[in-house]
Amino acid sequence: VVLAGGGSVAGQSLLPPDLFFSVVVPSVVPVPAPMVASQCNPCPLPPAYAAALQNKHKQVMEIRREIADAEQASAGCRAALQRAIQSKFKEWLLQSGNLRQVQDLAHHEERGQGDYPPAH
């Protein structure tokens, strides 16, 4: 439920399935090896949202396959692929405003502050 106008209840509306993403919250509690993070979700998704996530997963797997195929190509092709990925990633960092966060993380790593505090 998104707290915004336009729903049947004032101030609420449903998020369209194609805009839905799962969120993984990092945890220091170990998950059993055969269990995937998404399998830990105690709430089943409505079919439209599950289908949307499955479609996104298929798209990611297709991209991974294409990258793996390109890595099998010549060294020149691999270098061009790496440059293209880095360029698009930098473009995304700038457009999304996430560049500062990455710089802050790198700064903390340099100062030895990149580790998570121990769990209590």
Image (spheres, helix red, strand yellow):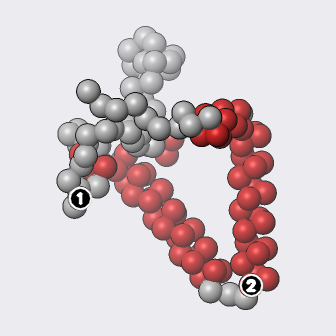
Quarter holding residue 95: top right
The amino acid type found where label 2 is placed reads Ala
In the image, what residue occupies the spot 30% across and 31% down? Answer: 119
- Between 59 and 10, the one lying in front of the other is 59
**Direction front: furthest residue:** 112
For mark 2, does the 10 Å Cα neighbourhood hold few (<14), some (14 to 19), or many (20 or more) residues?
Answer: few
* Whether residue 103 is situated above or below residue 120 in the rendered picture: below
Residue 113 lies, in percent from the top left, at: 54, 33
In this view of the protein, which residue sits in the foreground, 81 or 17? 81
Q: Which corner quadrant of the image does residue 104 belong to?
A: top right
* Residue type, numbered disc 1: Ala
Residue drawn at x 33%, y 38% is 27
The label shown at residue 118 is none
Residue that extends furthest to the top in the rendered view of this protein = 10
Where in the figure is residue 78, as x and y percent of width and height?
A: 72, 78
- Mark 2 and mark 1: Cα distance apart in space: 36 Å
Which image quarter: residue 86? bottom right
From this viewpoint, is residue 16 visible?
no
Asked if 13 appears above or below 82 in the picture, the reply is above
Tell me what residue is drawn at x 77 percent, y 65 percent. 84
Q: Which residue is mark 2?
A: 75
Residue marked by disc 1? 33
Q: Residue at x 51, y 41 (%)?
A: 19
Q: Nearer the viewer, residue 56 or 69?
A: 69
